[in-house]
Image (cartoon, rainbow, N blue to C red):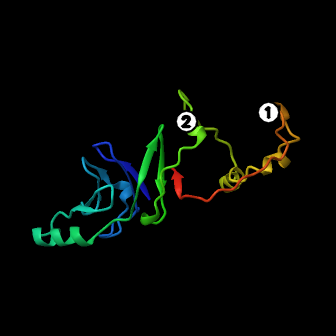
Amino acid sequence: MVLFRDKSGRLGLVQKRCPHRQASLEFGRCENKGIRCCYHGWQFDIDGSLLDAPGESPALNHRLRDRVRLGAYPTIEHQGLIFAYLGPPNEQPEFPIFDAMTFENMERRPYAAPFRCNWLQVLDAILDPLHTSFLHSSIGRIQFSEGFGEIGQIDFFDRNSWLLG
């Protein structure tokens, strides 16, 4: 997928390959309306609709706009973060606002903490917070809050397919 912001400020999340000749839209050009493929210049709006197919006759250009679509996904920008809905279009839920997303004056700063490791193992560990109660409870407890090693109740909820990007 390619996430972009067109020159009018709208966010688009589209499939990576142009449906014309499969050129990568990673190298596309953001325009006032949508993104233009770098290979033959086909232009797509943020919803995946074809806006322009340069070099084609007006009649063919019109037919192509009716028939060609690029896969696209709705996005929401909330407090500087971008979320995307990847589920079925007819089942798109309302965007959830969780308690942690309502803090006033919360400062978010990008940071990097490079270290040599297997990134896939780190990702797996991040997605499994329960392991911290066992693996990390006996090492360096000073940096954790009181009660850190205790196992609490875990509530499970249905996933609504909104992803953070």
Residue most extreme to the top:
105
Image: 75 above or below 72: above
Mark 2, Cα crowd under 10 Å, few <14 / some 14-19 / many 20+, is few
Real-space Cα distance between discs 1 and 2?
A: 23 Å
Q: Position of residue 1 (x, y in %)?
A: 44, 59
Q: Nearer the viewer, residue 86 or 137?
A: 86
Image side of residue 27 versus residue 62, left or right: right
The picture quadrant where one finds residue 120 is: bottom right
List x then y, in percent, for residue 38. Answer: 29, 58
Q: Nearer the viewer, mark 1 or mark 2?
A: 2
The reply to whether discs 1 and 2 touch (Cβ–Cβ < 8 Å) is: no
* Residue 5 drawn at (x, y percent): 35, 46
Residue 86 numbered tag: none
Q: Quadrant of residue 53?
A: bottom left
Q: Tag on residue 102?
A: 2
- The residue pinned by badge 1 equals 145
Q: Earlier in the sequence, mark 1 or mark 2?
A: 2
Q: Amino acid at mark 1?
A: Ser
Q: Assess disc 1: are there few (<14), some (14-19) or many (≥20) residues with their C-alpha within 10 Å of its C-alpha.
A: few
Q: Quadrant of residue 98?
A: top right
Report the label total.
2
* Depicted 115 relative to depicted 84: above or below: above
Asked which secondary structure carries label 1, the reply is loop
What's the residue at 29%, 53% (across, down)? 34
Going 22% across and 70% down the picture, which residue do you hit? 66
